[in-house]
Structure formats: structure tokens, C-alpha cells
Amino acid sequence: MKIQNVVVGAGFAGACIARRIAEEKNESVLVIDKKMHIAGHAYDEYNEHGVLIHKYGPHIFHTNNKLVWNWLSRFTEWNNYQHRVLSYVDGFYVPMPISIETINSLYNLNLSTFELESWLDERRLKDLLIKNSEDVVLSKLGRDLFEKFFKNYTFKQWNLDANQLDASVISRIPVRHNRDTRYFSDRYQGLPTLGYTKLLSKILEHKNIHLLLNTEWSNIKPDLSYGKLFYTGSIDEYFDYSLGNLGYRSVKFEYETFFDREYFQKVGTVNYPNDYDFTRITEYKWLTGQKILQTTIAREFSSSEGEPFYTVPNASNQILYKEYTKMIPNNVFFIGRLAEYKYYNMDQIVERVLFLDI
Ligand code: UDP
């Protein structure tokens, strides 16, 4: 069968690409996904207790890009949720990312924003050449804060020390020299009012888009001929692991629902850098704003086994990824976290797709 465009993966990347092709080029697009559902890892659903959860971990949309926000806003309204995270350190729940509020409550101080600058200046390692994620924190905050907030969380999450990880990983977490305790400071923030699955189903709802779920690319590839292929899965899988396996981290979720209280914790997510085996607990009601008496939490356990959630940006993986890219045919486009072997936030992937030459 001959098809103009094939998109592999019905997550954010695949759905947005398909929509652009369908709308702007008025060409037909076949979107396939191996999962039984659309929306990739942004998939959300109501669990058996009626609580809306994110099946593959918390997704909080945030962007400074008005173009991205406006484009998505054609398909959804937003609940304007602003994410807040506490970190459980030395027996206290303190705001994360580290801000003046974090330092003052943890060390029982009353520093002004001005005093914080010199307080940090006495602790941070100056003139450090930034080679990895540990250096990022040491140069901004010094060793004590690195050990309390980042060292063990990072090891739990990656099974690697922070000095084995590319600087980009921890650079995602800012240091706030003010009293802003939100996790993100972007201009536009929120979750789709009806959820991500509904948002992505709206994006895919177009007469030129044909959707095939529960379908492995490798199984239907021999029967298809196509003009262009937009592939959003893992690049090493696409090439049958012929050059070797890239590293990934997966996440296992342990859910618990409480019927005796409306909320379990004070904010959407609590990080546990030094206690327990899980990295964090998310309580979905905070994110979704759902009005319901019971509440569901998810504890996250990072794992080397299971489907890929995160790429592992270190030197050897980057080299292998580059080798794979040399094999990409001219009519195939690799787009997205797994396909480009890099961390993308949802807004970054939408931006990537909006600027893509389709
Ligand atoms: N991190 C940490 N302590 C924290 C939060 C984050 O050490 O309390 C580090 C950790 O290495 C993590 C990275 O910063 O993988 C990025 O954190 P983010 O919250 O962006 O992770 P994601 O939500 O993508 O899992």
C-alpha cells in the first residue's frame, strides 16, 4: 500500500506533526502506535476510583513560547495550575527548587534576598569548570546543598553519580534568588482542562488523519510504501539495535488511594532525595484540580528495566546516538525524546514540530 505520510507514535510529537501535515499540506497521514491508546506518555485516564491520573508520571505543561501556547489552545482550555514541589530534607518539607524560602527554613535563618547572594557566595565553588551535573550544583550552591538535595536523588533516579551525567540534567532545576516557590516560572502554565488524552485526541481529529493503534511499526513496515516517515520511537530500536543499545531509564509507579481524607500531602509533588527507595510522590488532584472526595498518589521508582522514559545523557550514549544518526535515510525524520535521544519538555517538542520543515 502506498501512503503519503506515516507517523510512528501518537504522543505529543506524532500528533502535532500529523496535524500540521493534514492541515497545512492537505495530505493524508497514517499515525500508528504500538500502545492501545493515543497520547504516549502524556496519557491520562480515570482510575478505578474515579481519580484522573497520569499513567506515565506527572505532566505539567509550561512554556514561555506564546506561539506554542496559542497553537495548543486551539484544542484545549487550561486549568492554569502552577506546580509546587516540596523536598523532604533533614525531617523538614522545604520548597524546591531552592529559593530564599528553602534556605531560611532549612537553616533557620531570616536572610533577605540581598543577604542570600553573599550567603551563597561563601559556599559555592568558584571558578569551577562545568563538566557535569555535580559541577552545576557545586558552582551555584556549594557542597552541603548538593548533598542534601541532589546527590542521592540523582543516584536513585539514574543509578549514576551526578558527576557521570551531562550538565544539562540538573541544569533543568533553577536556583531562585527570590521568594518564588513555584517549580516553573514560565509565563504560561497549566494542564488541559479535560486532560492530555482529550487534548491529543482533538489534535488527531482531522479527516486526513488515520489512526492505527496496537500496531508495531516493524510488523507493518514490510507492507507499506510511503513518501515521508516521521518516527518518534527509540532510534536504536528503529535500526534493530545494530550498533548496540542506548541507555534509558524507566519508572515504575506504586499507586495508593485514600478514602479517609481529601488530600494526602500539601502540594502536587514531594521529592524524597535521602529517604525511601522512591524518588517522589505525586498527588494527582493537585495537578488536575479534580473535585472528588478520595485521592490517589503515585510513588515513583526509577528502574533500568521497562519501557524507556528518559534518555541517559552521558558521553558514551551521545557517541552511539551520533553513529545511529548517520544511518537515517533522507525521507525519514526522527523527532522527539526517544528519536533524538534528548530530554524535551512537552512545549519544547511542540515548538520543534511547529518549526519542522514538513
Ligand atoms: N533533581 C535532584 N533533586 C530533586 C529534583 C531533581 O537531584 O529534588 C535532579 C535529578 O537528577 C533529576 C533532575 O534534577 O533527574 C531533573 O529533575 P526534574 O524534576 O526536571 O525531573 P523530571 O520531572 O524530568 O523527572
Image: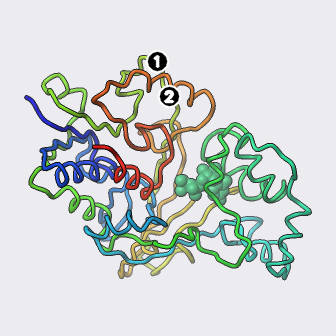
Task: Tell me the quadrant of the picture where the N terminus can be found.
Answer: top left
Q: How many marks?
A: 2
Question: How far from the left and from the top, in percent, is residue 182?
Answer: 59, 73
Residue 276 can be seen, yes or no: no
Q: Residue furthest right?
A: 122
- The answer to whether residue 331 is above or below residue 271 is above
Type of amino acid at the residue the image marks with label 1: Leu
For marks 1 and 2, give the one nearer the viewer: 2
Q: What residue lies at 34% left-to-right and 27% top-to-bottom? A: 238
Ligand 1 is found in the corner quadrant, namely: bottom right
Type of amino acid at the residue the image marks with label 2: Tyr
Question: How far from the left and from the top, in percent, is residue 206?
Answer: 13, 56
Label placed on residue 321: 2
Taking depth in this image into account, of 40 and 116 the one nearest to the observer is 116
Question: How far from the left and from the top, in percent, is residue 60?
Answer: 45, 65
Q: What residue lies at 71% left-to-right and 40% top-to-bottom? A: 161
Q: Secondary structure at mark 2?
A: helix
Residue with the mark numbered 1: 243
- The answer to whether residue 82 is above or below residue 344 is below
Q: CA distance from mark 1 to mark 2?
A: 9 Å
Residue 102 horizontal side relative to residue 356, left or right? right
Q: What residue lies at 33% left-to-right and 56% top-to-bottom? A: 43
Q: Secondary structure at mark 1?
A: loop
Quarter-of-image position of residue 259: bottom left
Task: Tell me the quadrant of the picture where the C terminus can be found.
Answer: top left
Question: How far from the left and from the top, in percent, is residue 47?
Answer: 31, 64
Q: Residue furthest top?
A: 242
